[in-house]
C-alpha cells in the first residue's frame, strides 16, 4: 500500500489487539472505486495470517446480491470443516436461532485461534448475510474476532441504514481511503527512491520529476488503480491499460453509471446534471449521486471544468458505443446545447460528432463556430466544421461561399487542398451563379494563391455586375491580403511605361490588379522599401491574416536587399510555421528560404530545404505552390550536376493551368533549365519566352525576381543565335533592375561570351566584381571560371591558375561538382581536399589581416591586377603593393599564388 502509512499503522494495532490481547473490533473500510479497498483487505488478511490468525474471506457480487446468505455461505465454506454451522433462515424465529448459533461457533473457534473475517464489496452483499454479520459483531465483543468489511462510500447496498447500526457498536472503527495526493503519486514513480530523488535534485532533474508526477496526477486524479494502469502503458502515456482501468472503474460505480458515463463523454463541457439526466434517461437525483461517485474516484475533470478528467478517458467511453447510438447521442446533445443557449462552438462540436446538419440553424452555427475557432487559434477544428458545412450546402452559391472560406483556412495545413477547394467556386462563377458577396472573396483568395489570371477573370465578372464590392462603400476586393504597405498603385502593378501592354482588364473601380500583390516596389519607394519590410517583419506575428503580408515583405527583402539579409527572416518564419505544424505556411516560408539559399549559392542547403518542405506537405504530388518549391529543388540539383534526380522531381504532376499563376512560372523556369542541361535548347527557349510573356502581361517583369532574358539568351547561345542572344542581354541592361549587382553580373557573364578575348576579359572582370557584391557564390564561381579561361586565352596563365583555384574552391563550397570538374578536370571527390588545402596558410594568420589588407588580397585572389585593384578601391597602385607585401609577410607565402582561395571579405565590399 503506497503512502498508506497511517492506515497501515491502524491495521497493525487492531491486529495486535485481536491476536495478542484478545480485543475484538469491527473495521468498515470505505472509499471510491479504485482507491485500494480490496488491496487494503488483502493486506489485512496477509498480516493476520502472519500473526497466526485464522482468516475467513468472502466478497459480495451483483449476481449473488439477491441470493439469501450467499456471502455467509462463503465464510462457512472457508472455515475448517465442521467449525461453523451451515446458515439457514426458514422463518424469523429459526433465523434468530441460526444467527446465535453462528456467532457462538465463531466465539468457540476464537478460543483456540484468533479469527479475522474479511468481506469485500459490502454494498453487493445480500441483506440476510448482513444481518448475520451484524449479529456476529454484537456477540463477539469480548472474543478474539476482528471483522474487516470493505464497501463503496456511495452505494449503501441492500441495507442503507447499515452504517448507522454499526455506529452504535463501541468497537466500531470507520476507515476512509481517499485518492493519493501529488506527493504520493511522485512516490509511486518507478525511479522515486529517496537516494535517487536526492541524486535527481543534485543533477537538476528534480523539476522534471515533479512535472512528470503532476502530469500523472492530472491524468489519474490520484486514483491508485488508474495510476497503476497508466504506469503500465508505454512511456506512461494513456493507452490500452489506462482505458481498460477507466472502464472498470465506471462499471464498478454502479449499474446506472455506464449510461451516465456515455452521456458525460458525449456532453463533455455541457455535462450539467439536467443535461445528463435528459440524455441518459436518469433522474436528476440519480445523476447527482452518480456524479458524486465519479468525482470521488477522480474520473471527472477538476473543479471549474465539466466532463471526464482526461481525453483518453473520454475516448475510451465513446469508443465502446456503437456508431449509430453514439451519433444519436451527439445529435440529441446538439439540440440540448442549442436550446440551452450554449456557445456556437459547443453546438457545432456536437453537430460535427454526429455528422448532422439537418437543422435549419446548422449551417450558420457551423460557419460562426469556424470563425471563432480561427480567432482562437484552432484552424484544424475550423476546417473540420467548414468541411461539414460545405457538404451540407444544397445551394450552389452558398456551397461556393463556404468552399472559398474553406480554401482560405486549408491553406494553413494543405496548400494543394486549398487550391482544389476553389475549383467548384470557379465553376460556379463561370456559370454566373455567384453574386458580389462571393466574387470578392474568391478573387482575393485566388490572388493570395498567386493565380493571377483567374483572379482577374473573377474581378472582371464583379465589374460586369456593376455592383460595388464589399459593403457598398467601395472597398477593394483584395483588401486584407496585405497589412504591409502596398507600393504598386496601378492596375498593371507598376509596369514600366515602355512595357508591351496587354488588353486592359475591366476591374472594379476600387480594385488594384491582383499582380500588384506580387510586385516589387518601384521608384521612388524602392530605396526605402527594404528597410520598411524589415521593420514590418520585426513586429509581425504569424496568423491567418498575416501570412501574405509577411511573405510579401520577405520577397521584398530577398530581391531588393539581397538574400543574405532575407535569409535569417525566412528561417525565423519557416521555424514559426513548423512550430504551429502548419504545413501550408511551411511551404510558403520554406519555399522562400530555399530560394534565398539558392540565391546565395548554397545549392545543397536549397535542395535540402525544398525537400523538407515537400516531404512535410500532406499532398506532395500536387498544387502550384508546392510545384514552385519543387522547382527550386530542381534548379539546385541541376547546378549540382544531379540531372537524374532533378528529372525525377520535375516529373511531379503539375495542375492544369499552372502557368497562369506566379508559382507556375517557377516550374517553367526549372523545366527550361532541365531542358538546357539535357541539350533540348528549343524546348528551353520556349519555356523562357513563355515566362517573359506572362511577366510582361502582368506587369511583373523584374529581372531581380525572374531573369528570363538571361535564361533565353543562354538557350539562344546554345542554338548559335548570337545576335538574338545579344538583343535579350542588352534589353536586360536597360530594365529598372540593371543596376542590381546580381542582375548585372549574370548578364555581363553571358554577354562576355559574345566578345573578343580582350573585351571579354574586361567584361568578365566587371561581372566578377558585381557577383562578389551580390553574395551569390555559385554565379561568382561560374563567372570566375570563365574569367580564368579568358586569362589563359590572352596569355596570362599565372593569373588564370589563381582565378581558377578560387573558382574551383567556390564551386566546391556550393556543391557544384559538375562546375568543379569543368574548372579543374579530375580534381573532384577525394582529390579535391588536397588541391584545396595544399600549402594553405594557417587560419590564425589569415585572421591577423586588417580589413584593408583583406579587401586587397580578396581582389587579388579574383585575378585583378594591382592597377585594377587600385581603381576599384580608389587607392594608389603603391598602396596596393604595400598591402600585398604585408599580406605575403603575415601569411608567410611567396606571392599571389599562395593566397588562400577561401578568403572572404571581413566587411562588405564598397559600392
Image: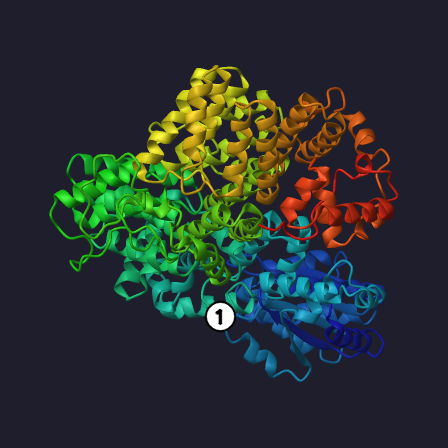
Left or right side of 692 for 63: right
Q: Position of residue 286 (x, y in %)?
A: 41, 67
Q: Position of residue 897 (x, y in %)?
A: 80, 34
Task: Name the residue rendered at 72%, 57% in the picture.
Answer: 78
For mark 1, give the secondary structure: helix
Q: Nearer the viewer, residue 817 or 57?
A: 817
Task: Judge whether 539 appears above or below 733 on screen.
Answer: below
Q: Position of residue 384 (x, y in %)?
A: 37, 47
Task: Name the residue rendered at 80%, 70% in the picture.
Answer: 114
Q: Nearer the viewer, residue 262 or 685?
A: 685
Left or right side of 260 for 744: right
Q: Nearer the viewer, residue 659 or 413?
A: 659
Please, which colouring scheme is shown?
Answer: rainbow
Q: Which residue is mark 1?
A: 292
Task: Name the residue rendered at 53%, 40% in the picture.
Answer: 742
Task: Name the residue rendered at 51%, 49% in the picture.
Answer: 581
Q: Quadrant of residue 27?
A: bottom right
Label 1 neighbourhood size at 10 Å, few (<14), some (14-19), many (20+)?
some
Q: Quadrant of residue 655?
A: top left
Which image quarter holds the N terminus? bottom right
Q: Is residue 756 visible?
A: yes
Q: Is residue 395 visible?
A: no
Task: Judge whether 409 appears above or below 149 on screen.
Answer: above
Q: Residue furthest right?
A: 892
Q: Position of residue 828 (x, y in %)?
A: 74, 24
Amino acid at each position: 500500500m503506497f503512502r498508506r502509512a497511517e492506515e497501515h499503522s491502524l491495521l497493525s494495532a487492531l491486529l495486535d489487539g485481536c491476536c495478542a490481547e484478545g480485543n475484538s473490533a469491527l473495521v468498515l473500510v470505505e472509499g471510491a472505486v479504485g482507491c485500494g479497498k480490496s488491496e487494503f483487505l488483502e493486506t489485512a488478511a496477509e498480516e493476520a495470517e502472519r500473526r497466526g490468525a485464522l482468516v475467513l474471506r468472502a466478497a459480495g457480487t451483483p449476481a449473488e446480491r439477491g441470493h439469501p446468505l450467499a456471502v455467509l455461505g462463503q465464510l462457512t465454506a472457508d472455515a475448517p470443516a465442521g467449525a461453523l454451522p451451515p446458515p439457514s433462515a426458514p422463518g424469523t424465529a429459526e433465523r434468530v436461532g441460526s444467527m446465535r448459533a453462528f456467532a457462538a461457533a465463531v466465539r468457540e473457534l476464537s478460543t483456540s485461534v484468533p479469527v479475522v473475517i474479511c468481506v469485500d464489496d459490502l454494498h453487493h452483499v445480500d441483506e440476510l448475510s448482513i444481518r448475520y454479520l451484524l449479529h456476529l459483531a454484537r456477540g463477539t465483543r469480548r472474543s478474539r474476532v476482528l471483522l474487516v468489511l470493505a464497501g463503496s462510500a456511495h452505494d449503501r447496498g441492500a441495507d442503507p441504514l447499515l452504517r448507522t447500526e454499526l455506529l452504535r457498536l463501541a468497537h466500531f472503527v470507520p476507515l476512509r481511503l481517499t485518492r493519493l495526493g501529488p506527493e504520493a503519486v511522485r512516490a509511486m514513480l518507478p525511479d522515486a527512491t529517496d537516494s535517487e530523488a536526492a541524486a535527481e535534485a543534485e543533477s537538476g532533474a528534480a523539476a522534471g520529476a515533479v512535472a512528470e508526477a503532476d502530469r500523472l496526477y492530472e491524468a489519474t486524479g490520484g486514483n491508485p488503480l488508474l495510476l497503476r494502469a497508466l504506469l503500465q502503458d508505454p512511456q506512461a502515456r494513456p493507452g490500452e491499460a489506462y482505458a481498460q482501468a477507466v472502464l472498470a472503474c465506471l462499471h464498478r460505480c454502479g449499474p446506472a453509471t455506464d449510461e451516465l458515463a456515455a452521456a458525460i463523454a458525449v456532453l463533455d463541457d455541457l455535462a450539467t446534471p439536467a443535461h445528463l439526466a435528459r440524455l441518459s434517461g436518469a433522474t436528476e437525483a440519480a445523476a447527482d449521486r452518480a456524479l458524486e461517485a465519479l468525482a470521488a474516484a477522480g474520473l471527472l475533470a477538476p473543479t471549474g471544468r465539466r466532463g471526464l478528467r482526461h481525453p483518453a478517458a473520454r475516448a475510451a467511453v465513446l469508443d465502446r458505443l456503437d456508431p449509430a447510438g453514439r451519433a444519436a447521442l451527439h445529435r440529441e446533445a446538439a439540440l440540448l446545447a442549442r436550446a440551452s443557449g450554449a456557445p456556437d462552438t459547443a453546438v457545432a462540436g456536437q453537430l460535427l460528432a454526429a455528422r448532422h446538419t439537418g437543422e435549419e440553424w446548422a449551417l450558420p452555427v457551423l460557419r460562426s463556430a469556424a470563425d471563432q475557432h480561427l480567432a482562437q487559434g484552432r484552424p484544424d477544428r475550423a476546417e473540420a466544421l467548414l468541411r461539414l458545412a460545405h457538404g451540407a450546402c444544397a445551394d450552389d452559391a452558398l456551397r461556393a461561399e463556404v468552399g472559398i472560406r474553406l480554401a482560405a483556412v486549408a491553406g494553413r495545413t494543405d496548400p494543394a487542398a486549398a487550391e482544389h477547394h476553389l475549383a467548384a467556386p470557379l465553376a460556379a462563377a463561370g456559370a454566373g451563379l455567384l453574386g458580389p458577396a462571393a466574387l470578392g472573396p474568391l478573387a482575393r483568395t485566388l490572388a493570395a494563391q498567386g493565380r493571377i489570371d483567374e483572379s482577374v477573370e473573377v474581378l472582371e465578372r464583379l465589374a460586369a455586375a456593376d455592383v460595388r464590392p464589399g459593403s457598398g462603400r467601395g472597398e477593394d476586393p483584395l483588401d486584407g491580403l496585405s497589412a504591409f504597405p502596398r507600393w504598386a498603385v496601378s492596375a498593371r502593378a507598376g509596369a514600366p511605361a515602355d512595357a508591351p501592354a496587354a488588353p486592359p482588364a475591366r476591374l472594379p473601380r476600387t480594385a488594384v490588379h491582383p499582380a500588384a500583390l506580387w510586385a516589387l516596389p518601384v521608384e521612388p519607394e524602392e530605396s526605402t522599401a527594404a528597410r520598411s519590410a524589415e521593420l514590418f517583419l520585426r513586429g509581425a506575428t504569424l496568423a491567418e491574416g498575416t501570412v501574405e503580408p509577411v511573405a510579401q515583405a520577405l520577397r521584398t527583402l530577398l530581391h531588393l536587399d539581397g538574400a543574405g539579409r532575407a535569409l535569417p527572416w525566412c528561417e525565423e518564419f519557416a521555424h514559426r510555421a513548423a512550430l504551429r505544424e502548419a504545413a501550408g505556411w511551411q511551404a510558403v516560408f520554406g519555399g522562400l528560404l530555399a530560394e534565398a539559399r539558392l540565391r546565395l549559392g548554397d545549392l545543397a542547403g536549397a535542395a535540402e530545404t525544398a525537400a523538407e518542405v515537400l516531404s512535410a506537405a500532406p499532398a506532395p504530388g500536387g498544387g502550384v505552390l508546392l510545384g514552385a518549391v519543387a522547382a527550386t529543388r530542381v534548379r539546385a540539383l541541376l547546378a549540382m550536376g544531379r540531372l537524374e534526380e532533378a528529372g525525377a522531381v520535375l516529373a511531379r504532376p503539375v495542375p492544369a493551368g499552372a502557368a497562369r499563376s506566379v508559382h507556375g512560372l517557377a516550374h517553367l523556369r526549372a523545366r527550361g533549365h532541365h531542358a538546357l542541361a539535357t541539350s533540348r535548347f528549343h524546348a528551353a527557349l520556349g519555356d523562357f519566352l513563355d515566362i517573359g510573356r506572362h511577366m510582361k502581361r502582368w506587369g511583373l517583369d523584374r529581372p531581380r525576381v525572374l531573369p528570363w532574358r538571361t535564361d533565353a539568351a543562354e538557350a539562344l547561345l546554345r542554338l548559335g543565335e548570337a545576335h538574338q542572344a545579344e538583343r535579350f542581354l542588352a534589353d536586360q541592361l536597360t530594365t529598372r533592375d540593371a543596376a542590381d549587382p546580381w542582375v548585372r553580373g549574370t548578364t555581363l557573364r553571358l554577354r562576355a561570351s559574345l566578345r573578343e578575348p580582350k573585351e571579354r576579359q574586361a567584361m568578365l572582370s566587371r561581372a566578377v566584381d558585381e557577383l562578389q557584391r551580390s553574395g551569390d557564390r555559385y554565379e561568382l564561381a561560374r563567372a570566375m571560371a570563365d574569367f580564368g579561361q579568358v586569362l589563359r586565352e590572352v596569355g596570362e596563365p599565372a593569373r588564370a591558375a589563381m582565378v581558377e583555384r578560387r573558382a574551383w574552391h567556390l564551386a566546391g563550397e556550393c556543391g557544384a561538382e559538375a562546375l568543379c570538374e569543368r574548372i579543374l578536370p579530375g580534381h573532384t571527390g577525394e582529390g579535391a581536399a588536397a588541391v584545396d588545402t595544399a600549402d594553405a596558410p594557417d587560419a590564425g594568420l589569415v585572421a591577423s589581416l586588417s580589413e584593408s589588407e583583406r579587401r586587397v588580397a580578396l581582389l587579388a585572389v579574383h585575378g585583378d591586377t594591382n592597377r585594377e585593384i587600385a581603381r576599384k578601391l580608389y587607392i594608389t597602385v603603391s598602396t596596393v603593393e604595400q598591402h600585398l607585401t604585408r599580406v605575403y609577410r603575415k601569411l608567410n607565402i611567396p606571392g599571389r599564388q599562395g593566397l588562400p582561395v577561401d578568403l572572404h571579405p571581413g566587411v562588405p565590399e564598397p559600392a
